[in-house]
Image: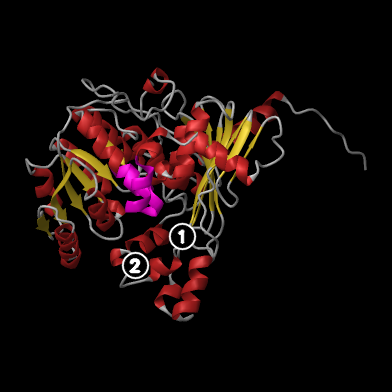
Amino acid sequence: MKTICTKPTTISRMMILAFTLMAFFACQPGQPAGDSPFTAREVFETPVRPAGQHHVLELRTEPLDTVRIAIVGLGMRGIGAVHRFSFIEGAKIVALADVVPANVERAMQMMADRGMPPADGYTGADDWKAICEREDVDLVYICTHWDLHTPIAVYAMEQGKHAATEIPAALTVDEAWQLVNTAERTRRHMMMLENCNYDFFEMATLNMAQQGLFGEIVHAEGAYIHDLRFLLFEEENGYWDMWRLRHNEQYDGALYPMHGLGPIAHALNIHRGDRMEYLVSVSSGQFGLTAYAKDKFGEESDYAQREYKKGDMNTTIIKTARGKSIKIQHDVTSPRPYSRIHMLSGTRGFAQKWPRRGIALEPDGHSWLSDEELEKLLQEYEHPIVREVGEQARRVGGHGGMDFIMDYRLVYCLRHGLPLDQDVYDAAEWSAIIELSRVSVANQGMPVKIPDFTRGAWNELSTVTYYTKKP
């Protein structure tokens, strides 16, 4: 039999193109494939800025002689903040709130032990609204479960208060826009409490990057790889009401990208000269939570029979407008040593914190600096803020001192009327990766656009600046 091969006709080429486009658009966020939970409204365009609003890049507000603070949520994170604020000049805690009365009592006792003036206590589920409405509160410091971060921050700003929230600041793109629009409309600060930006190595490498030691940074990596299985399933001393386990049951994607993303985003000047344009995200299957539940509770237990949607390892790749690439990973269910990776790769050098801390520089980029050379370089490029308060931070503690530096800087900038180190666009962009990655994962790693939360203002600046008051 003779087979005759012919070139495709114009009609056949048009049919091939049509089927290709149909397949492509079937997997777009507006029309997801398979059992994706996303609907036509998930087309993540950047909306026009409402009339009368202006961007809040490098926002400056009236200086506060004393920053009067209300802490909402006194569990794992909030109680540490009570301790740290007792060491910070110009910080005064006036209100404490938690739905667990024992947490409020513990915080009040800590304040008394530290010789701090007493604060008012709240234990009602909705008492955060009354706290935001108080006239003697300047800053609402939010340490609740994730679902309340945006509602409390938005309400606080609407009541004329500055807001600082534990991570993530938002769980959806819509919530991220709520934060941005409220901050722009009210001209109030909104900061996500990304403590990893203030780790000593991260701050040193930020200083190195800003002084050009690595040349042009081309690629960066970060992660949150942290075995949390015990805490996820711990009913008594884990996450209150097991809220974090529910997120792993319901969603798949980069559910907690901020710790790895924050420090490298600042090193790359994201929304201060560059912006994240799109991402692709892929998750492994889910194995770890089911295996752990079977081992801990038995194969027939409720926990072992549940469906956990979160794949063990999520990998998200981001491309920026200036041609840089970013890799972010998330895994809280594997028996692995802790890692945030924190890697910067440039045209003249390389730095990485985990699993091996090291730096390599031209002209011998193939080799790590020796331990002696590395320590000398880290001392030379120690960030000025670390030089100022690093020793006190190590004494006070909080993840080795970075939590103290974060709170110190927040109070310092509010007292001096300076722009905060992290702003609402950081909070929105880094948090939006959660939902954007979920869309990509649900659609077989499809590229998903990242909204421009600055609405074009990212190009007005050239670098991240941690401001200090000149002597």
Mark 2 secondary-structure assignment:
loop
Queried whether the magenta region covers residue 405, the answer comes back as yes
Q: Amino acid at mark 1?
A: Lys
Queried whether the magenta region covers residue 209, the answer comes back as no
Q: Label 2 neighbourhood size at 10 Å, few (<14), some (14-19), many (20+)?
A: some
What percent of the width, then of the height, locates residue 229?
45, 67
First along the sequence among labels 1 and 2 = 2
Would you say residue 58 is visible in this rendering? yes
Mark 1 secondary-structure assignment:
loop
Q: Label 1 neighbourhood size at 10 Å, few (<14), some (14-19), many (20+)?
A: some
What percent of the width, then of the height, locates residue 21?
57, 33
At a point 26% along the width and 31% down the height, the residue shown is 181
Q: Is residue 296 above or below residue 158?
A: below
Would you say residue 169 is visible in this rendering? no
Depth order, front residue of 108/159: 108
Q: For this view, does 147 lie left or right of residue 458?
A: left
- Point out the image quarter for the N terminus: top right
Depth order, front residue of 107/373: 373
Q: Is residue 127 above or below residue 27?
A: below
Quarter of the view holding residue 460: top left
* Disc on res. 182: none
Quarter of the view holding residue 213: top right
- Point out the image quarter for the C terminus: top left
What percent of the width, then of the height, locates residue 465?
38, 27
How far, Cα to Cα, is label 1 from label 2?
A: 20 Å
At a point 34% along the width and 67% down the height, the residue shown is 238
Residue identified by numbered label 2: 238
State if disc 2 and disc 1 touch (CB < 8 Å).
Answer: no
Residue identified by numbered label 1: 309
Q: For this view, does 197 lie left or right of residue 104?
A: right
What are the residue bounds of the magenta stretch?
A: 389-407
